[in-house]
């Protein structure tokens, strides 16, 4: 499949950390090496929970310089860079190309009022029929309405990966997989002019949509060149929503699979050829996001390891310091399903008092209330497995996809306890890995654009499967107990 050896850099930005990886293809196999990892997360700036983009770009440029050097030691030249990240958030630029403010974080509460304002003017089901996107408070549409005057004074809006690309090469472009999450695209995957007009949003903020695999230009940022990045390094659009890249790297043998892209968020879904726009899908909160090479990802958002990250942070503020691996090991020794919450609940979206909110949900569900760090970890792991079960069974029923196996990719693939719980809860085998699926999916699009790999999803997935080992987890019984737990949580939603 691979015509020649090559090296590219994958910039993978997550909501809690970012990475730069050197991805090489040699003798028909992929390999990756992490050259930079840096913390990420929101911080309050002038009353808005925000992303520190200047810091992220500085770390990215250092990582690209390191990737340039490492490629040379492998006898290769770093040919390109691609950027993927979380969805919906954006930077607003003025006429000189400068940020009007740091990009707001999707967990900032400013969208609560705008969500109510939009849905009071426009029937939610009608909104869903236009875009196929589930109505979530943090969607770009509601953020833009909340930004009001600031948005009106801006010249351009760039989603986070598009913004990083622009800062690297000076070219503005709007990559379509990430744009599809905004609730501002039609089902025909064009900007919805009527929505911009209806809510007085400047249409000039966005421009021509581009597909993954487009070469925007070469790295021109003075700071990147000064750090040691080769000026011949191309900037290539990838499937820039990190889940779109991660799903491309699922090492599946056929289309009969469900995926869990597991990190700070968990995105749980199946892959379709076309969007599924039914009232049942709308009511269930399923969303249709564009994947690489025109495929659709029908999925549901689940809170993911954000819950555990917040619990760990809160205990640390009190001087009780634990890491996720230690808590997971301690949690495994506790009785299963003793503490349960609805891990899909919007009540768990924002920062602050996560333990209190989890405890309140346990009371509502009717289970014991966690107190110790290990008990909170057990609550979260069991509840995530239940949420995966609900999402997968619901999506399979509505889409008609016969799910034969679950692929867990991303950081959560390293959590053996969660992988086993997911297999038990869903009564399906789980294949875990690769951990760096988003970076791998990012890289194979670049390699395809460079002519190194064919534009063939199945062939790409076969290459991923042959290059990176996975672990298999099989159900270990307890189906009746999981049914009872699911009924408890379901009853608490009514």
Image (tube, rainbow, N blue to C red):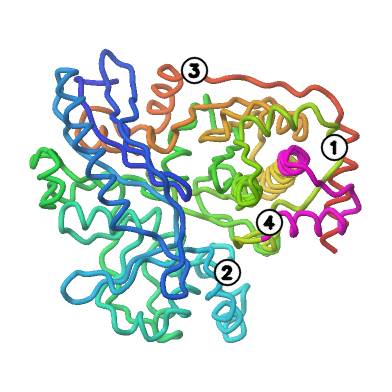
Q: For mark 1, does the 10 Å Cα neighbourhood hold few (<14), some (14 to 19), or many (20 or more) residues?
A: many
Identify the main secondary structure in magenta.
helix
Q: For mark 3, does the 10 Å Cα neighbourhood hold few (<14), some (14 to 19), or many (20 or more) residues?
A: few
Residue at the disc numbered 2: 137
> Which of the labelled discs sits on residue 482, or is there none?
1
Tell me which corner region of the image, top left, top right, bottom left or bottom right, holds residue 118.
bottom right
Tell me which corner region of the image, top left, top right, bottom left or bottom right, holds residue 374.
top right
Tell me which corner region of the image, top left, top right, bottom left or bottom right, holds residue 244.
top left
Q: Is residue 470 above or below residue 255?
A: above
| Residue drawn at (22%, 32%) of the image | 66
Where does the image place residue 442, in percent across and percent down from the top left? Answer: 35, 39
| Residue drawn at (91%, 53%) of the image | 366
Residue at the disc numbered 3: 469
Q: Is residue 443 visible?
A: no
Q: Is residue 285 above or below residue 215?
A: below
Spatial distance from mark 3 to mark 4, Cα to Cα? 35 Å
Q: Earlier in the sequence, mark 1 or mark 4?
A: 4
SS under mark 4:
helix
Q: Earlier in the sequence, mark 2 or mark 1?
A: 2
Where does the image place residue 131, in percent across and percent down from the top left? Answer: 50, 66
Q: For mark 2, does the 10 Å Cα neighbourhood hold few (<14), some (14 to 19), or many (20 or more) residues?
A: many
Where does the image place residue 394, in percent across and percent down from the top left? Answer: 72, 48
Magenta run includes residue 323 = no
Residue at the disc numbered 4: 354
Q: Can you say which quadrant of the picture contains the N terminus?
A: top left
Left or right of residue 94, residue 130 in this image: right
Q: Is residue 96 visible?
A: yes
| Residue drawn at (21%, 20%) of the image | 3
Spatial distance from mark 1 to mark 3, Cα to Cα? 29 Å
**Magenta highlight range:** 353-382
Q: For mark 4, does the 10 Å Cα neighbourhood hold few (<14), some (14 to 19), or many (20 or more) residues?
A: many
């Amino acid at each position: 499949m691979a015509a020649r050896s090559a090296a590219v850099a994958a910039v993978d930005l997550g909501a809690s950390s970012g990475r730069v990886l050197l991805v090489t293809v040699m003798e028909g196999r992929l390999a990756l090496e992490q050259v930079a990892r840096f913390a990420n997360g929101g911080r309050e700036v002038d009353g808005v929970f925000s992303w520190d983009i200047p810091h992220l770009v500085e770390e990215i440029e250092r990582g690209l310089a390191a990737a340039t050097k490492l490629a040379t030691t492998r006898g290769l030249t770093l040919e390109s860079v691609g950027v993927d990240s979380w969805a919906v958030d954006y930077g607003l630029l003025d006429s000189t190309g400068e940020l009007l403010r740091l990009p707001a974080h999707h967990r900032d509460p400013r969208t609560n009022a705008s969500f109510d304002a939009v849905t009071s003017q426009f029937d939610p089901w009608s909104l869903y029929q236009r875009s196929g996107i589930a109505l979530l408070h943090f969607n770009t549409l509601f953020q833009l309405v909340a930004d009001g005057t600031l948005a009106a004074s801006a010249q351009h809006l760039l989603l986070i990966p598009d913004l990083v690309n622009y800062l690297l090469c000076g070219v503005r472009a709007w990559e379509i997989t990430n744009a599809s999450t905004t609730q501002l695209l039609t089902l025909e995957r064009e900007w919805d002019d009527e929505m911009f007009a209806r809510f007085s949003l400047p249409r000039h903020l966005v421009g021509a949509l581009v597909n993954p695999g487009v070469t925007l230009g070469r790295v021109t940022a003075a700071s990147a060149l000064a750090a040691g990045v080769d000026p011949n390094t191309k900037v290539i659009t990838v499937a820039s929503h990190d889940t779109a890249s991660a799903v491309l790297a699922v090492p599946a043998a056929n289309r009969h699979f469900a995926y869990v892209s597991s990190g700070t968020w968990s995105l749980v879904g199946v892959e379709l050829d076309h969007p599924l726009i039914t009232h049942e899908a709308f009511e269930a909160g399923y969303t249709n996001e564009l994947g690489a090479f025109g495929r659709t990802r029908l999925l549901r958002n689940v809170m993911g390891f954000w819950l555990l990250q917040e619990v760990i942070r809160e205990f640390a503020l009190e001087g009780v310091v634990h890491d996720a691996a230690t808590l997971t090991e301690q949690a495994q020794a506790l009785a299963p399903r003793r503490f349960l919450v609805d891990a899909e609940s919007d009540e768990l979206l924002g920062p602050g008092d996560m333990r209190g909110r989890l405890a309140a949900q346990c009371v509502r569900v009717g289970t014991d209330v966690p107190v110790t760090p290990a008990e909170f970890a057990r609550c979260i792991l069991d509840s995530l497995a239940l949420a995966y079960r609900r999402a997968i069974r619901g999506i399979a029923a509505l889409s008609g996809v016969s799910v034969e196996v679950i692929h867990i990719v991303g950081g959560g693939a390293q959590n053996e306890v969660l992988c086993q719980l997911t297999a038990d809860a869903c009564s399906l085998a789980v294949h875990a890995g690769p951990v760096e699926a988003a970076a791998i999916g990012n890289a194979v699009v670049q390699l395809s654009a460079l002519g190194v790999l064919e534009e063939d999803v199945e062939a790409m997935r076969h290459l991923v499967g042959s290059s990176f080992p996975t672990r298999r987890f099989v159900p270990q019984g307890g189906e009746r107990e999981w049914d009872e737990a699911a009924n408890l949580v379901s009853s608490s939603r009514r």
